[in-house]
Amino acid sequence: ILGGGGCRMAREFGSRDNVSRLTMERLRYGARLHRATGLGIAVSGGATGKLNTPEAILMQSALESDFGVPVRWIEAESQNTAENAAFSRNYFAFDTIVLVTHAIHMRRAVGHFEEAGFGVIPAPLGFVSKTDSGTRFTDFLPTVHGLLGSRQAMYEYLGGI
């Protein structure tokens, strides 16, 4: 499971670092896959941005305390997706992985992990799609959801250059 950011000094969690909303979505799906398959969980992510604690350590804590799911492997030094893949290759002895990340991030993530020598089974989540209810005038008005989607699309585009 790839990290997707964190929150520094989250008040609701005792002013400690915590996983971001995006990371929590990935953890929830990873826990679900673990329960369905029995496969062990590996988490990847370092202390990016202003975090004092590596994302992988925060992810392990959330998986174990919030979902009751054990984490078997931890890579806690990477600063980006390319390093997630390269460092995971150095830390983990397995050759094939089930890669959990958001659908918009999957293509780039798969590329990095394949480049690092892993066989990858994609396990994407958070697909963005248009409903079948037709086009309405309000579809053309700006929304927070639309801005977030634009931000994620630009992040992935720029990350792939």
Image (tube, rainbow, N blue to C red):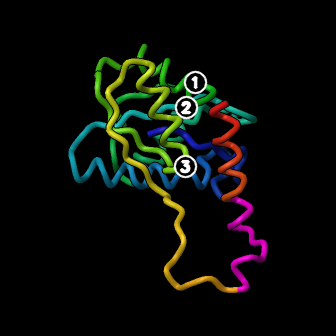
Q: Position of residue 160 (x, y in %)?
A: 63, 33
Range drawn in magenta: 137-148
Determine whether, in the image, residue 117 is placed left or right of residue 109.
left
In which quadrant will I find the N terminus? top left
- Mark 3 closeness class: few <14, some 14–19, many ≥20 residues within 10 Å: some
Q: Is residue 119 above or below residue 134?
A: above
**Looking at the image, do the residues carrying marks 1 and 2 touch, with CB atoms under 8 Å apart?**
yes
The residue drawn where x is 50% and y is 41% is 59
Residue 127 in the image, given as x and y percentages of width and height: 49, 59
For marks 3 and 2 on the same chain, the one whose residue lies earlier in the sequence: 2
Distance, label 1 to label 3, CA atoms, is 20 Å
User: Between tags 3 and 2, which lies in front?
Assistant: 3
Q: Secondary structure at mark 1?
A: loop
Residue depth check, mark 1 versus mark 3: number of the one nearer the observer: 3
Instruction: Report the residue at 38% width, 18% height from top.
Output: 117
Instruction: Point out the residue furthest to the right here.
Output: 142
Quadrant where the C terminus is found in the figure:
top right
Query: Mark 3 and mark 2: span between their CA atoms?
Result: 18 Å
- The local secondary structure at tag 2 comes to loop
Report which residue position mark 2 lands on: 45
Q: Which residue is mark 1?
A: 78
Query: Of callouts 1 and 2, which one flags the residue occurring earlier in the amino acid sequence?
Result: 2
Residue drawn at point x = 66 percent, y = 34 percent: 159
- Mark 1: amino acid: Ser
Question: Is residue 118 located in the magenta-colored stretch of the structure?
Answer: no
Q: Nearer the viewer, residue 79 or 73?
A: 79
Q: Which residue is mark 3?
A: 104
The residue sitting at the top extreme is: 90
